[in-house]
Amino acid sequence: MRLTFFYFTIFVGPAHIVARSIQLRDNEITSAQILQVAPGSDSCPSPSDECATSAQAAPFLNAAMSKYSINSLSEQASILALIAFESGNFKYNINHFPGNPGQGTRNMQSASFNLQYVKSIPELASQTTYTSTDGLNSDQLNQIRALVLPDDYTWASAAWFLTQQSACADARRTLQASNGDEGFTAHMRCVGISDINESRMAYWRAARTALGA
C-alpha cells in the first residue's frame, strides 16, 4: 500500500494552493532491489557462516524498517547503502579488517553501540550484566556482539542506530526532506564515518535508484 504525506501551503488569493508530497513506503524492499545495491549478493560462497544473499536479507530488512518506522525511501536507501558497503555486499557479519573485538552486525557497529543495542532489546537485555564496555577484554566484547549477530537483530542494527541515536536526529530530518546527497552525508557522519569517498557514494546512488528515492 502506498503511503503519502501531504503538506499544504495556502496563499492569500483566489483558490491558490500549493501541495508538496513526500512519498513514503510504496512497497516492501525486494531482493531484486537489494541486488542492485549489493552486486553479487544473489549467491554465497560455500561454506560461509556470515554471508547472506539478497533473498535472505529482504524479509529481515523489511521487518527492521517496520519495527523502527523507517518509512521514507531516502532513509531506507541510506540504510541499505550503509549496510551493503560495511558488510562487503553482505559477506561479513563481524569486523575482520582490522578485526576489532566486539565490532559487527551488518552495519559494523562498534562494541559500545552493540551493548546499547543489546540493552534496547527486551529478549536480549537480560543475557548480559555489562553496563559498559570499558575494561572488557576481547572475549567479553565478542560475547556481547554474538547476541546481536542472528538475523533478527543484525539486519535491524542500522535502523536502530539511525532512529535511536540522538546524533542522527538531524540526519533523519534531512533524509526525510530530500533525496539529495546531503542527507546521506549527514547519516554517514552521525554513525562516525568521516571518509565519505566515491566508493561509498556509489552505493548511495545505487540504493536511491533501486528504491526510487
Image: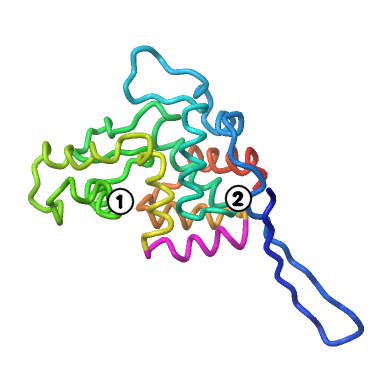
Furthest residue to the right? Answer: 14
The disc label shown at residue 42, or none: none
Q: Residue at x 48, y 40 (%)?
A: 61
Q: Is residue 172 left or right of residue 106?
A: right
SS for dot 1: loop
Counting from the top left corner in percent of width and height, residue 49 is at 32, 22
Residue marked by disc 2: 73
Q: Is residue 171 magenta?
A: yes
x, y (%) of residue 31?
A: 57, 30
Q: Which residues are magenta?
A: 166-178
Occupied quadrant, residue 140: top left
- Label 1: few (<14), some (14–19) or many (≥20) C-alpha neighbours in 10 Å: few
Tell which of 68 and 83 is nearer to you.
68
Label 2 SS = helix
* Residue located beneath label 1 in the image: 121
Instruction: Kindly identify the residue that appears in the image at 22 percent across and 51 percent down.
Output: 125
Relative to 124, residue 203 above or below: above
The nearer-to-camera label among 1 and 2 is 1
Q: Nearer the viewer, residue 85 or 172?
A: 172
Q: Which sits earlier in the primary sequence, circle 1 or circle 2?
A: 2
Residues marked 1 and 2 touching at CB (< 8 Å): no
Q: Main secondary structure of the magenta part?
A: helix
